[in-house]
Image (tube, rainbow, N blue to C red):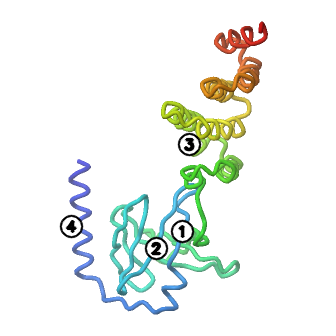
Amino acid sequence: MKTKLLFLLFILSIFISACSPSIDYSDTFIKQTQGKYLFNEDDIITISYKDNQLYMDWRGVKTKPVATDTNEFFVPDLYQKLRFVQHPETKARYLAIIPESNPDSLSYDYLKVADNYKTPSQYLEEKNWDMALQGFQKIKLKDSMSDFINQYKFNRLGFKYVREHKYDDAIGILIMNTKLHPNSPNTYDSLGQAYLVSGDSLNAYENYKKAYQLNKGNKRAKRYMDAYESK
């Protein structure tokens, strides 16, 4: 079913492309509209132009949307028609979704951000833990249950670094996780394990102690605490 739908979208995009008008983008228009737009708090759409053609880069895939007018284009992957808009008061620029049921409606959906803007996940990939933390904390303020700040996702990445013997990276992301989820015993337990395998017994003890304070049923943390305190 999914394959059939993708095929139909592909055929539709070819049909629309064949019927679409030839667009001549001015230098001013290109300068105003090219760049990054926030698809969500941790995802970016990038608009670029080459040889008077509009391109969209989203989630690592660069595509050529079907231009239907100077200010509008159709994106088969999203099955959405988008237009460039500017807020009359803030002057901020956006990509707006054009609903099929009301194409004349005006909305401000995907905010245009600075060219040097990075999402929290991009900072995470660069191992810039402080900037990643700042970004994820902003997301948490808006939605404390957001999947973007899922503690188990960060946990898995931390232990991936542990398996690769990249202990500094593991500790960096797991420290970030404790700050995002300070009431979770699991985050401190994991950080304690990372410190332990890295050879830092003191910080392992401190984090196992915190994990045990939050969860008295953590037998591993209690065993380590007892062994450390008996030295």
Q: Secondary structure at mark 4?
A: helix
Circle 2 sits in a helix, a strand or a loop, which is it? strand
User: Picture coordinates of residue 82 (x, y %)?
Assistant: 44, 72
Q: Amino acid at mark 3?
A: Asp
| Residue found at x 65% / y 25% | 199
Pick whichever, 5 or 51, lies toward us.
51
On-image quarter of the C terminus: top right
Are discs 3 and 2 less than 8 Å apart at CB?
Answer: no
Q: Nearer the viewer, mark 3 or mark 2?
A: 2
Look at mark 1 in the image and give the residue it sits on: 37
Q: Residue at x 63, y 51 (%)?
A: 128
Do residues under tags 1 and 2 come within 8 Å of each other at their CB atoms?
Answer: yes
Label ID, residue 147? 3
**What's the distance in space between the residues labelled 1 and 2, CA to CA?**
8 Å
Q: Quadrant of residue 123?
A: bottom right
Q: Is residue 192 left or right of residue 75?
A: right
Labels 3 and 2: the sequence-earlier one: 2
For marks 1 and 4 on the same chain, the one whose residue lies earlier in the sequence? 4
Of residues 159 and 32, which is closer to you in this image? 159
Residue at disc 3, secondary structure: helix
Per the image, the residue denoted by label 2 is: 47
